Image (spheres, rainbow, N blue to C red):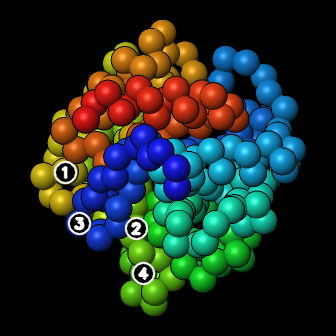
């Protein structure tokens, strides 16, 4: 594994160990309708392999993907280096990106079909985590409960190790918290509204993945933002997307200083 820069943390009470820095993979498969400050081309296969090998070398084991990330799942299935157990793969369900637009379906049938497709594309017989991919209408959180129950059923079947919710609001996170194993929550120095939710999740033994710690590429001081997110009570892993091995190394080095 080389010089491991990234520490490992328990993902709540799931029994899963995740690297403090996770690799977000939307940029591997989709460059339309994203909120990054600069346009980008999708990387070729060689660049994807180099990025994933760099992640492995640094000790990063968490790969965050989703059906809504275009070709991301398919490319990870084809190009993922090493053994399956080297990686913790977290994907999502409920959002689909087709013909340049997102659509959402949280019916049990759609959730089950999404998980089955993810298993096939990722070329694996289990998923470490599947999170419901909120459409942002979190206040009506009860509408997600049948989908959460379907994920729980698939977990009982052994297809999923942990269930989760990637929400947009504190109210949505609080409503789903009793029904999932982990949350993906937004936190960065410019947006701290979900910090109490993160603390409540941790107090209840839930895992917490932090998204948008670098404000979708708009952070003025990325290293400081990462350090702050890492020391936030409840943080298990900070998911950051990049196509640059150099940026990946810099992010890992910034987090090393938090030990």
Residue closest to the far left: 203
Measured Cα–Cα span from mark 3 to mark 2: 12 Å
Q: Quadrant of residue 20?
A: top left
Q: Position of residue 50 (x, y in %)?
A: 73, 45
> Can see residue 140?
no
Q: In the structure shown, which secondary structural element does the residue marked by tag 2 occupy?
A: strand
Left or right position of 230 against 161: left
Q: Quick one: label 4 or label 2, which is nearer the N terminus?
A: 4
Marker disc for residue 163: 2
Marker disc for residue 202: 1
Measured Cα–Cα span from mark 4 to mark 1: 21 Å
**Is 221 drawn above or below residue 73 in the view shown?**
above
Measured Cα–Cα span from mark 3 to mark 1: 10 Å
Left or right position of 189 against 160: left
> Can see residue 65?
yes
**Is 123 drawn above or below residue 220 in the view shown?**
below
Q: Nearer the viewer, residue 89 or 183?
A: 89
Measured Cα–Cα span from mark 2 to mark 1: 15 Å
Q: Position of residue 123 (x, y in %)?
A: 70, 75
* Residue that numbered label 4 is attached to: 155
Q: In the structure shown, which secondary structural element does the residue marked by tag 1 occupy?
A: helix
What residue is rendered at 28% in x and 30% in y?
258
Q: Quick one: label 4 or label 1, which is nearer the N terminus?
A: 4
What residue is rendered at 52% in x and 36% in y?
240
Q: Quick one: label 3 or label 4, which is nearer the N terminus?
A: 3
Q: Position of residue 183 (x, y in %)?
A: 35, 52
Measured Cα–Cα span from mark 4 to mark 2: 7 Å
* Residue that numbered label 3 is attached to: 13
Marks 2 & 1, CB-CB < 8 Å contact: no
């Amino acid at each position: 594994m080389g010089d491991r820069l990234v520490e490992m943390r328990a993902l709540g009470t799931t029994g899963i160990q995740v690297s403090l820095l996770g690799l977000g993979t939307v940029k591997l498969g989709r460059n339309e309708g994203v909120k990054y400050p600069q346009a980008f081309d999708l990387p070729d296969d060689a660049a994807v392999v180099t990025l994933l090998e760099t992640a492995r070398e640094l000790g990063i084991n968490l790969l965050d993907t989703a059906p809504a990330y275009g070709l991301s799942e398919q490319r990870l299935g084809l190009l993922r280096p090493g053994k399956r157990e080297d990686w913790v793969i977290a994907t999502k369900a409920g959002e689909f990106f087709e013909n340049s637009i997102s659509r959402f379906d949280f019916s049990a049938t759609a959730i089950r079909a999404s998980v089955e497709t993810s298993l096939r594309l990722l070329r694996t017989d289990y998923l470490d985590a599947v999170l419901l991919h909120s459409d942002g209408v979190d206040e009506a959180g009860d509408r997600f409960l049948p989908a959460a129950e379907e994920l729980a059923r698939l977990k009982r079947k052994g297809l999923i190790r942990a269930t989760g919710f990637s929400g947009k609001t504190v109210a949505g996170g609080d409503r789903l918290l009793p029904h999932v194993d982990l949350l993906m929550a937004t936190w960065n120095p410019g947006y701290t509204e979900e910090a109490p939710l993160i603390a409540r999740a941790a107090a209840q033994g839930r895992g917490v993945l932090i998204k948008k710690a670098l404000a979708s590429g708009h952070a003025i001081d990325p290293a400081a933002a990462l350090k702050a997110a890492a020391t936030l009570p409840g943080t298990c892993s900070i998911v950051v997307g990049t196509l640059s091995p150099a940026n990946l190394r810099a992010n890992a080095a910034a987090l090393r200083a938090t030990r």
